[in-house]
Structure formats: C-alpha cells, structure tokens
Amino acid sequence: MGGYFDWAATSPICDEALRAYAQTAVTYPGNPSAVHNAGRQAAACLKGFRERCASVLGCRPENLYFTSGGTESDSIVLNSALQVLSPGQIIISKSEHPAIRQYAPVLRRFGWQVTELPCPGGFASLKQLKKLLTPDTRFVFLMSVNNILGTIQDIAGAVEVCRDYSTSTGRPIHVHVDAVQAVGKIPLDFSGLKADSMAFSAHKFMGPRGCGILINTDSSLSALSVGGGQESGLRPGTENLPAIAAMTAALEKAVAELDENRQRATELNAYARDSLTQAGFEILSPADSDTGRCSPFILNVCSNSIPSEVLVRMLSDLGFYISAGSACNNNSRKKTPGLTELGFRPTQAATSVRISTGPLTTMQQMQELCSAMADCLKGF
C-alpha cells in the first residue's frame, strides 16, 4: 500500500537516462572545451546531444543552451533585464512559478515596473494582456503548464498579442515561457509557438536533477555571470556532459511516449475526480473535457476542513506522497499567495493539495490513494 504522487515536484530517473549517464561518464572523460583529443571527442558528443534535444523541442541547435535546470534558465532571462540601462515594464502572470515571481522585488529595485497579469481560475487573460501592454513593455513571462492546477496557457495566442502590439510601436517584446511542466505532458514545438525563450528542467521528465535547457532566439539577451565562455557565453561553466546525455535520453523517451502516458494519466485523473468528489473533496483543477486546456497529470483538490500540511503528513504516514503546493516554494520563508490570487477562496487555498502522476503511476495506486484520502477526511 502506498505510492508516489508528487511527480510535478520531481520524478524518478528512468533506466534509459541512467544508462546514458554511466556510458557517457566512462566513455567521454574530457572537458568539451579542451583542445586535446579527449576534449574534442567530448565536444563532438555535446554537439550531438544539442542537436538531438533541438530536434525534439523544435528549435535550431544554436538556440539551445544547457543549464542546471528550470530555475537557472528562467534566471538567465530575468538577470538580463537587470543590465538594461533604461528599465521599462515587465509583465508577469499571476500563475507563474516562484522561480519567476520571486524576482519581482529585485526587478523593482532595479527600476522596472512589474505588472501582474490576472489569471482567473489559473488561465492567463489575453484580454487583460492587451490592456496591460504599453510602449515601455519589454518582457512578458508566461507559464506553459501551471504547476499547481495543471492549467495550460494559450502561449501562441499570447505571443500573437505581443507581436501585434510590437508591430504598432516598433519596439520588441521578449516573451519567455516556463515550460518545465510541459515536456511529455502536452505537444510542444518551440518554433510553432514563436516565443523568444523557453525553460526546461530534466528532473520533471524522468531525467537527472541539476540539468536543464534554455531555448533563446533573442540576440540582445546577455548573461549576468561570466566565465569561460561555454554555451556561447550565455551560461558559462563546464558542461555536465553525463547529465546532458541522461537528459537527452529522458527527453526523447518522454516525447515518444507522450500519447500513451497522457491516455493513462487521463484515466487516472478521471477516476480520482469521481472518487474524491464522492468522498467529499472539492476539485479545483478544471476538467480538461470542459476546457481542453488542463494537464491530466496534475489534480488539485481541497477538503475545506483539513489544512494542507496536515493532510500531506497524514498520507505520508500511510506511505502516500502528495504535495501541499510547489516544492520550491515550501522552502521560502514567505509563501506566495498562490491559489487566492487565481480567484480561489482562502479556505480552498489553505486546504488544497496537489496530486501529480507520471508514467509509472498505476490505477491500483490511485485507487488506494483515494481510499486513504477518504478515510482521512472521515476521521478528521
């Protein structure tokens, strides 16, 4: 009895990634920046991984940069704004991950006007985006798949709004997308979305921790950190070749199995919705069948009676692992308002928990989790 239901926080590494890591670590001991044969072999290997990742994500290899994860990928874009001599406006959606939202006070100290884009129910309002754009808008930050509710943003629509406005003013607007929760969950093609940059994290799709990707096509973006010039100077530091190998293997597997995994997740999600509703829980994540814009891999529910942390501990004692919110935000002293800013009642936010599944989650595990949650609610 028991099961892991916190895939949105991190996922177990897959066998393909483990094998790729070990093989690359043994076969390519050289530094890709070194000029000797071992270095050149490692550089060629790195080039191959970059091309494979770019092919899967729909971008040009020269626009793909390897980083330490989603947070650093987001930070590279945010830090670039700190070097602008004449700060303007930055629009950040209210559904963003703390990796972006927590930058707001820093940006304001550097003279930026930070404007929050309303996201009622977890969906960014394109109507409001049109109203918020000004001639001083330089950046817009949007999350592809919300990590708490699973809501999917209309990125292509938002980019079109920004591009239309830029055409009228003649000033470019950089659109950055946090796509950490998107890989292996929804079809993803960078070139089709036409954003300027996009962030990914390997450990969300059964790759290694401490490894990620930034896609960027904006030549004006500059790195705040300096070093040996690796990754075209945008992310200096010796590349973690074994981790990149593992990430590449996990990325290819996640995308190749997307349809199969999504179908399984949809079945698990539907069962949980029905079972937990009957048990007395309230479902906060919108149904994909109603909107067509919600990931079946994430389900947020509330009890309106048991505090989130209490229910998480009760289930943990039974061997079930869920989340009370973003794992990254759990470490901060000041929690972000989260669900209340998306239009939910304080009671809903205070008692909400997130159930997130992955390719290894079984129906039996979901049935056992729902039964345990029902028992917790009855006994509270």
Image: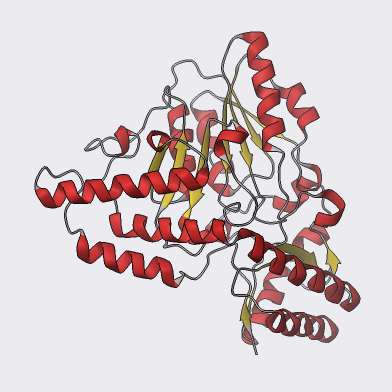
Quarter of the N terminus within the rendering: bottom right
Above or below, comparing residue 164 to residue 348 in the picture: above
Between 366 and 226, the one lying in front of the other is: 366
The residue at 27%/35% (across/down) is 226
Residue at position x 18%, y 59% from top? 29
Residue 190 left/right relative to 80? right
Q: Is residue 267 above or below residue 235?
A: below
Estimate the x, y position of residue 77 in percent, counting from the top left. Answer: 47, 34
Q: Is residue 225 visible?
A: yes
In the figure, residue 118 lies in which quadrant? top right
Which residue appears at 68% of the width and 45% of the height? 95
Q: Residue at x 46, y 70 (%)?
A: 14
Relative image position of residue 25 (x, y in whole percent)? 25, 63
- Left/right placement of residue 316 relative to residue 54 reads right
**Residue 343 vertical position relative to residue 16 in the rendered view, above or below:** above
Q: Nearer the viewer, residue 1 or 104?
A: 1
Image quarter hosting the C terminus: bottom right
Horizontal and vertical percent for residue 50? 37, 45
In which quadrant of the rendered view does residue 322 lie? bottom right
Residue at the bottom extreme? 1
Which quadrant of the figure has residue 242?
A: bottom left
The vertical placement of 299 against 320, above or below, is above
Which of the two residues, 125 or 311, is positioned nearer the viewer here?
A: 125
Foreground: 175 or 48? 48
Going by the picture, which residue comes out furthest to the left? 36
Residue 5 is left or right of residue 55, and the answer is: right
Q: Is residue 225 left or right of residue 91?
A: left
- Residue 9 is situated, as x and y percent measured from the top left of the image, at 56, 63
Can see residue 213? Answer: no
